[in-house]
Amino acid sequence: MRNLKALVLFGAVLAFPSVALAGGWAVDTASNCKVWNDFPEPGETVSWTGACYNGLAVGQGKVVWSIRGKAYEQYIGGMLEGRKHGKGKIIRADGDVEEATFVLGHRTPHMFW
């Protein structure tokens, strides 16, 4: 019976990898403000320049993600409850720029009429 439970649990992890790789809150140590991180990495830090409400990033601002002190991605745009919200721009270290619209951290699909 224990083997069956282990097998079912293993199958669930394979079927739903996003559950196994859940995100978490990252805290900007300068502002003590939290920003949601979908895919945390060891040694990763966040910097938030903007308003903070109830400990969460809110309003227009800039998020900078770094690993071991080296910035690899920036987000400039709206935040709500610590998550990307509204129009924003993602700038990667290689110079790639992506503009998108987000709703509570989820990218909205582009629609053409």
Image (tube, helix red, strand yellow):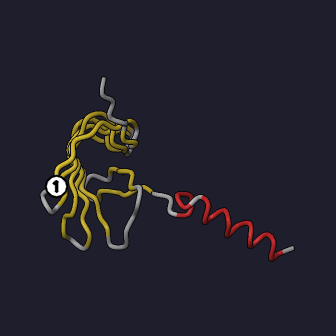
Numbered circles on residues, count: 1
Quadrant the N terminus occupies: bottom right
Disc 1 secondary structure class? loop
Q: Which residue lies furthest to the left in this view?
A: 95
Q: Name the foreground residue: 49 vs 76.
A: 76
Residue carrying label 1: 96
* Residue 55 percent across, percent down from the top left: 37, 45
| Quadrant in the rendering for residue 15 | bottom right
Rendered position, 89 above or below 111: below
Q: Which residue is drawn at 37% across and 68% down?
A: 41
Q: Mark 1, residues whose alpha carbon is within 10 Å: few (<14), some, or many (≥20)?
A: few
| Quadrant in the rendering for residue 45 | bottom left
Amino acid at circle 1: Asp
Q: Which residue lies furthest to the bottom in this view?
A: 3
Q: Name the foreground residue: 75 vs 8.
A: 8
Q: Residue at x 30, y 28 (%)?
A: 112
Say left or right for 20 vs 26: right
Q: Name the foreground residue: 77 vs 99.
A: 99
Q: Which residue lies furthest to the top in this view?
A: 113
Say left or right for 32 vs 104: left
* Residue 87 percent across, percent down from the top left: 25, 35
Say left or right for 83 vs 77: right
Rendered position, 32 above or below 80: below
Quadrant the C terminus occupies: top left
* Residue 54 percent across, percent down from the top left: 39, 41
Q: Residue at x 81, y 72 (%)?
A: 4
Q: Residue at x 37, y 44 (%)?
A: 82
Q: Name the foreground residue: 2 vs 98.
A: 98
